[in-house]
Image (cartoon, rainbow, N blue to C red):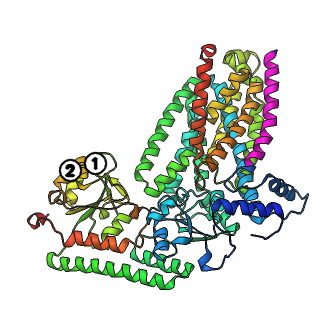
Amino acid sequence: MSRNHQGALLLTGLAILLPIMVIVSIGVGAVPIPAGDILTILFDRLGFSDSSISNQSALIIESIRLPRTLLGLIVGGALAVAGASMQGLFRNPLADPSIIGVSTGAALGAGIAIVLGGLLFAGAHSLIQSYSISILAFAGGVLSTWLVYKVGTTGNGTSVATMLLAGVAINALAGAGMGMLNYVADDTMLRNLTFWQMGSLGGATWDLVIICATLLVPVILILGRYGLVLNALLLGESEARHLGIDVQKVKLKLIFLTALAVGVSVSVSGVIGFVGLVVPHLIRLAVGPDHRILLPASAMLGGILLLAADMISRTIVAPAELPIGIVTALMGAPFFLSLLWQQRKRIA
Amino acid sequence: MKKTFKPLFLSTVMAVSAAMGANTALAHNSHDNQRIVSAGNGVTEIIYALGAGDQVIAVDQTSTWPTQVNQLPRLGYHKQLSAEGILALEPTMLIGTEDMGPPSTLAQLESAGVEVEALPLKHTAESIENQIKSLADILGKEEQGNALWEDIEDSLDEAKALAASYEEKHEKKVPVLFVLAMGGRSPTIAGTGTAANAMIGLAGGYNPAAEQFKGYKALSNEAMLLLAPEVIIFPGTASNPDVTPESLLEQMPILKQTPAGKNGRVVAIDGNMLLGGLGPRTGDVALSLAKSFYLDQGNPSSNES
């Protein structure tokens, strides 16, 4: 049972690393703030002490770094656990949340908001206007997932193979839609579209953190409980059915939860690629495919890696910011390739 | 910023000041002691033209003129400003156009005590005047502001006069197109709502593409011939030193078939000047364009389109 041991070890290690990473992330930034001040500020907010730290440092911690760190943690966790669930459900190592169309659908929704938002939301409430990109991104993600699901579902249940193909088609369709939007957009909109597609946690505010936490933390926890079911699905659908699992219901729930997780993540932070694909593979390469370990470990590692990527994104070109999607792909892809290179005999 | 004498805090401030190589004097309300972050090409140019360039500590990506700004830290794209990155520079003021963002960053900067000035931006001469007047007001440079605007206005008036005398004789303005070489073989043309279109108008030209579409569009060869520009302007000189009139015609052979191409009336302007909105150089550029439209007329026999 060395695998179980390894898994427990990994989970413990990640659980220790996670809070360390959170503190490092709060400590790192363009403005140098000594560690002592950071602790004082945090304790101060918890009501423990009366600090005399400058307002500016307190403000940077409170209204810039802390919400940003929490958002990165939640979004990274949600993307990674959603990726792990999709790879398990589709029994396909290439599956990531984009395979059910949710990412490109969300991107199309955001694109519509960026390019046509002026027309669509002209008379709307200012609150709706300022969140129009998030709202349409979420709607686009959920709508395209629903379409993919509908195409893949017949009276006999949902065929994951059909869903994969439908996902490819929906992605192509959304891509064409984005092309159209690119064509009609003016210069400013084009820049916005491009930046949005490269992702950023820069828009983190407490409002967004609260919305994300209420929606995503329960989703991450619920998805984390599907370990045994996904393990059974690894054997094949009919085998899982014989083990007493209502496969159709599981599919519906997993797809819904993934669409929710990715739709919300994408709508607040833009498209952050690679986390959903790579993180579960890293865990699998380390401790094998047991979903009881894979799901919680992915959630934690996703959060840790996204925080690391965000630290690079906001410091490397300061005072400007490098879009985080570039960092995740730039870090993730070579690392993933080197792992594949080392382990290709074992995998094949 | 609240003043305290805690050694820890003091040492931070001192370390930061040393790193910045600047004094963090807390003189918020004095005009001369501002630490300005400028996010917008036009705004940066105006601040320098008003003689307040020594107070600028960082600029955005579009600001490339005057050349001193290339030594300053870069903020990145003016719609994707980073609150903490800017705060690390310890500015007292962020000046830009209403285009800058995101709003969350601006709000965070304001609550950190940074004065945020978002000036209205339109592609008109009035907008330049308003920007100059507001900036002069903010920086306490009213006199310089008035003088600067008068200069620009004189140049614009001169350009207008050139166009008017030509129009009287020929009963039309010169049709001018702004052409972007986007790497492909079909020319990308500036329509209405672009800074390039505004520049053509201020120089007394007439942009036939403005009636047809908004923004920048790639045109087919046939449409290009129909528009029959007598002058073509393109972003060259400082912004794209590789693009010369010859290389532009070589890259897009259809341009040779237009009246402008036949008469060799292809004029380069600094493309960076159009990126962040019109600015203090607009007057000079408009006047030199007007001269190339109306004084240097190539071969007059083929001017009838």
Asked if the residue at tag 1 contacts the one at tag 2, i.e. Cβ–Cβ closer than 8 Å, the answer is yes
B271 with respect to A218 (left or right): left
Percent x, y for residue B207? Answer: 28, 65
B85 with respect to B223 (left or right): right
Few, some or many C-alpha atoms within 10 Å of disc 1 (few <14, some 14-19, many ≥20)? many
Image height check: is B187 above or below B286?
above
- What residue span does the magenta drawing correspond to? A2-25
Image height check: is A171 above or below B156?
above
User: Which chain is mark 1 on?
Assistant: B
For this orientation, the residue located farthest to the right is: A48
Q: Secondary structure at mark 2?
A: helix
Q: Secondary structure at mark 1?
A: loop
Q: Earlier in the sequence, mark 2 or mark 1?
A: 1
Few, some or many C-alpha atoms within 10 Å of disc 2 (few <14, some 14-19, many ≥20)? some
User: Which chain is mark 2 on?
Assistant: B
**Dot 1 amino acid type:** Ser
Q: Quadrant of residue A97?
A: top right
